[in-house]
Image (cartoon, rainbow, N blue to C red):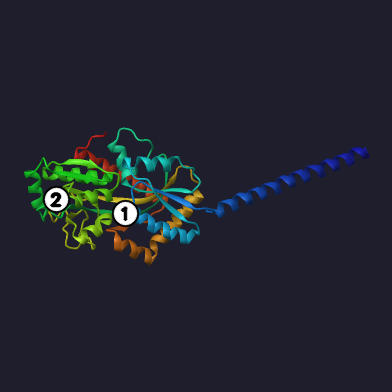
Amino acid sequence: MKHSLIHRHGLRRMWRGAIAGLLLGSAVLGAGLAGAQQAWPVKPVRIILPFGPGSATDIVARAVADEMRIELGQPFVVENRAGANGFIAAEAAARAPADGYTLFITSNTTQTNNQFLFKKLPYDPVKDFAPIGAINEQYYVLAVPKALPVNTVAEFVAWLKANPDKASYGWGAAVAQIAGAAFLKEVGATATGVPYKSSPQVTTDLIGGQLTFTVQGVTSGLQVLKSGRLKALMVSAPQRVPQLPDVPTGAEAGVAGFRASAFVGMFAPAGTPESIINLLNTTLMKALRKPEMIERIEVCCAGHFIPSTPGEFAEYLRKDRDRWAASIRSAGIQPE
């Protein structure tokens, strides 16, 4: 009996020790995981863009990258992957590891319009991405070469109708394509459409006279327009933009349907930890509230900030898809 009692006491001590060891091990492991999460980021973060240097999205992305580097203490490196209507960049971002070290700053082109312009995409704009936050909305301008003998939208429409075989327009983003096609349909004119990898290339050919017109972001075309190398005929904003105060709105120019705008927003690959998504959103929203950031964007970019939570941005995207689907149908553009 005595040996049995000692044996039972020994077993109890052994089990208590084992349980204590397991609890201690779990606590250490939990603390280690929490520490790993809190440590993010511990290396440079890559931001993929679907457009080239000098585009509206590029200008905004670089401003955001500078602020996030300051806030989080790691480089945020912008990587331009222009071409194929954003397919190249979107697929690269969608297939990247969901660890927070690859982000995607993009616009309506990849996340809204492509699904209505193409029958098949190499990525899913909804399922493959986690919305982090919207940054801003930007407006567009209809521009023509300096040498074209027109100075108003009415004169330009008359020229288009008199020269249907000579007219052409280029675009480096889906929003510009849709806006250009919608403009032609509204005024009853025709022109040959020419796709480009990115908006700056469109601007170069427009200056050189290889194109008749383009619809491009005010941001990417602002310096060229102010220099006089191109002529701005109207803007897509509901009111005149401060950067081009002498340029009428579509409504003022007699083309009320010219109301294009595009968002710029930040995404991560689907499956990125929620803690990282929330930290990125908090950091992004803090950057957008900084006076120096506001001034930097106001100087270069015609538009307005649209700060949001990840959930609010997801709802914004849903409404944006509905809006552009209707615009594409109205413009008569068929999926390729």
In this rendered view, identify the residue nearer to me: 220 or 146. Answer: 146
Looking at the picture, tell me which residue is in the foreground, 293 or 146. Answer: 146
Cα separation between marks 1 and 2: 28 Å
Q: Is residue 235 above or below residue 170?
A: below
Image position of 325 (left or right of 271): left
Q: Amino acid at mark 1?
A: Gly
Q: Secondary structure at mark 2?
A: loop
Locate residue 184, reporting x and y percent. Answer: 15, 44
Quadrant for the N terminus, please.
top right
N-terminal-most mark, 1 or 2: 1
Picture residue at 38% right of the left edge, 59% below the top = 63
Q: Is residue 29 left or right of residue 48?
A: right
Q: Sort mark 2 into few (<14), some (14-19) or many (20+) by Cα contacts within 10 Å.
A: some
Quadrant (top left/top right/bottom left/bottom right) for the C terminus: top left
For disc 2, the marked residue is 255
Using a 10 Å C-alpha cutoff, classify the residue at mark 1 as few (fewer than 14 neighbours), some (14 to 19) or many (20 or more): some
Q: Position of residue 163 (x, y in %)?
A: 8, 43
Instruction: Please give the name of the residue rendered at 92% of the width and 38% of the height, measured from the top-left corner.
Output: 3
The image position of residue 164, as x and y in percent, is 10, 41
Question: Any mark on residue 54, and which?
Answer: 1
